[in-house]
Image (cartoon, grey):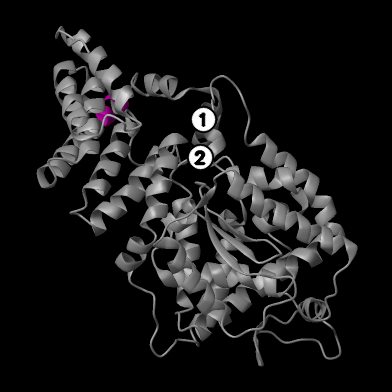
Amino acid sequence: MHRRVARLKCAAQILVFSVTIPGAITRAQELDKAATDFHFTDVDNQVLHDSKAIDQQYLKKGMVLQDPQLQPYLDSIGKRIIGNRPTPDQVEFKFLVLRDPMVQAFALPNGSVYVTTGLLSLLQNESQLAAVLGHETAHVFERHGYLENRSVRKKVLTLNIIQIVASAAPTGANLSQSVQLFGAAVLLGASVSSGVIVASVFGYSREMEHQADSDGLIAMSNASYDPMAMAKAFELLDQDSSLEYEPIQGFYRDHPKLTERRDFALQYASTHKPNKPEGDDEKTYADNVSAAICAEIQLDLSSRRERTAVDRASRLNDLFPDNPRYKVLLADSYRALGAKTKLPSPDERTRHGEAEHRKEYFSMTPEEEQKKLLEKPEGQAALRDNETMAEQLYKSALQGSPNYADAHRGLGFLFEQEGKYGEAATEYQSYLSIVAATSMDHLRIERRLAAVQKLAGTPVPTR
């Protein structure tokens, strides 16, 4: 550990984890003093203005997920993490969910704390979410957004990082809008104010991030959450990132830092176990954030992240095996996998394999990728296995809920994909008989029904 004080503060509580040099003012102490003595300047007022503008854009673009069960749940955790600490000037704490597959959370200097659907879908319980909110609210309490913006380091890094972000969302005929769903929140925020977004998403200085982890550990402990959950969250972040290529990787996917942060959290947690820790039940957590997980699965399927979609949908289906919606989401995910295996092969996990995946991600359409995979026996076997699994799941959903329209529609898509046009027509007809004629998908399925009836040699009824 560097020669500095790693201070964990909450009200009057200060814990020292390293020895300081007598008479020296450490960088951590300087940050504490800067936050305490903070006064707004014209530069800071511009940052505040930009933060509010980013909030407005997220709402305007429909990126904020608003759910009557998820929102009060998130608010309640945020309120517990804040506790009775006085709110800093020009701060209004708000806890919001962004529709974005990128595993990320960040706080704007004005107190808006954002968690993506990607991160909510990865975390396993409330304690882990509390750890994230503890870290992010610490950045607000410590005025890190403003202080970082004043620093030379921020000005030097901003241009380079924004160039990286821009290159991660290329455009082209092959890409449509699919890959641009990933990291959309970062790109939109950067288009409003790159200066505010850069450090928020990609990390502050080493000392500031350490301070945020420290304060977050104290805050979650004081709220009766087990600080061990922060260490576990870092493990999940590290493990999950190997499923498939990610166009943008922010602070929460920084692997070197993850190991260091995990070790620090373990050190603290080993001596700070709450008497009655709360928030460890995975099923309760998944139920409360299910809207985010379901939204995330759809986003993953729309951004060519089928393996992640299978992983997220499998979790919901395992926790709630009688819910037809989760069965259908899992079936949709297996159907979308096509000739792709559920997990990356050993070759795909190599540096060369990752580079090839990245190249194909940007240069191939989904159809071209599937065609290439089907050239190999492994791809053909994967397609058979995935289609079989999808069919079993659709039929299982219908066995418990015969009139669940989405299961009929999914089976129709699957049978059409397999060339079973008569069976596809039957499922499409079942779907249309259940849903209202005014439903958004009614006309599309009518057209598909007519197409498969023609392919099957079945007379198409006139309207």
Q: Does 103 sit above or below residue 387? A: below
**In whole angstroms, how far apart are the C-alphas of marks 1 and 2?**
8 Å
Q: Which residues are magenta?
A: 379-383
Q: Of helix, strand and loop, which one carries label 2?
A: loop
Left or right, 309 with respect to 92, comes to: left
Residue 66: numbered disc:
none
Asked whether the beta carbons under mark 1 and mark 2 sit within 8 Å of each other, the answer is: yes
| Residue identified by numbered label 1 | 361
- Comparing 369 with 392, the one in front is 392
Q: Residue at x 76, y 78 (%)?
A: 28
Please give the name of the residue rendered at 11% of the width and 47% of the height, measured from the top-left corner. Answer: 400
Badge 1: few (under 14), some or many (20 or more) residues near its Cα, within 10 Å? some
Q: Is residue 323 in view?
A: yes
Look at label 2 and name its amino acid.
Tyr
User: Quadrant where the C terminus lies?
Assistant: top left
Whether residue 230 is visible to the viewer of this picture, yes or no, is no
Instruction: Determine the secondary structure under disc 1.
Output: helix
- Is 357 left or right of 151, judged from the image as shown? left
Label annotation for residue 245: 2
Residue 203 lies, with reference to residue 442, above or below; the image says below
**Three-letter code, disc 1:** Tyr
Depth order, front residue of 261/454:
454
- For residue 369, which quarter of the picture? top left
**Label 1 or label 2, whichever comes before in sequence order:** 2
The residue most toward the right is 42
Toward which corner of the image does residue 72 lie, by quadrant? bottom left
Residue 450 coordinates in the image, percent (x, y): 24, 14
